Amino acid sequence: MPELPEVETVRRGLAPVMEDATIVAVEQRRPDLRFPFPEDFAARLQGRRIVSVGRRAKFLFIHLDKDPVLIAHLGMSGSFRIHDEDSQEMPGNFRHERTKLAAHDHVVLHLERGGRTHRVVYNDPRRFGFMVFAEAYDLDAHPFLASLGIEPTGNALDGAVLAALLAGRRSPLKAALLDQKLIAGLGNIYVCEALWRAGLSPKRLAGTVSGRRAARLADAIRTVIADAIAAGGSTLRDHQLTDGSLGYFQHSFNVYDREGEPCRREGCAGVVKRVVQSGRSTFYCSACQR
Ligand code: ZN
């Protein structure tokens, strides 16, 4: 499942192609994804100019020159591909994969920008993703967005803010960090990584994190997200050379999916453990995370 860094990588990949482009035509190939497409989906997009591509948590926003805003979510398996005039001829070894994937191409946006045409293709085998419209003036009040917590990417998340969010909470720290009403877009992988980085146990009561611990954790959250976005950025360029896919990348983790392997913290002799919390796997080192 794409987490926030992947979605931000997708945004950064789409923005240079989409911003300032005109939507010439829209192919909508099925009536629904996770939700039905909005009524007159294609007609409301055709002829519009894209002003910007934004993101909040794991929601992508395509802002147009007139209302509405297109909100896109990648769900479990959604991805975008970019095709331009020059990539019509693909190397033979990609042909099979492309043909197979084409059955899951659900939306094709035909764009024109500076006299060049591009196609942006949305592919989603499991169809948990969705595209809906929202009114631009009302975006923050949209049902998907109204209750979202603070973004984990910017300077807004510091120790004092995090301590205030966690104060008095009797849930395990990991569960609190996964609560989208507190911090939006932080998922299982990066919570595990941030807790390892901060040296804090996922089992600790959330309300016990304050002061220097909270500052360390806020710093760890921002850093793991920023590192992942940076890693995605370099992979993104590689992908664009091959099949135009955006947003999925291998990233090396310190604890996530490393059960039984040695802790990577210098001077720690611990071994990474896996426990299940609220139905999700937690990976951590009990020797150095307290
Ligand atoms: Zn350790």
Image (spheres, rainbow, N blue to C red):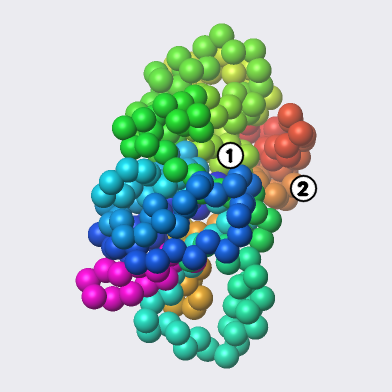
Gap in Å between the C-alphas at discs 1 and 2?
22 Å
The secondary structure making up most of the magenta span is strand
The answer to which of 12 and 36 lies nearer the viewer is 36
Amino acid beneath label 2: Gly
Q: Is residue 16 above or below residue 11?
A: below
Residue 132 visible here: yes
Residue found at x 66% / y 17%? 171
* Number of the front mark, 1 or 2: 1
Amino acid beneath label 1: Gly
Q: Is residue 147 above or below residue 73?
A: above
Residue occupied by mark 2: 260
The answer to which of 154 and 247 lies nearer the viewer is 247
Residue occupied by mark 1: 187
The quarter of the image holding the C terminus is top right
The answer to which of 24 and 288 lies nearer the viewer is 24
- Residue 42, image x and y in percent? 45, 57
Q: Which residues are magenta?
A: 109-121
- Residue 36, image x and y in percent? 59, 47
The answer to whether the beta carbon of the residue marked 1 is less than 8 Å from any atom of ligand 1 is: no
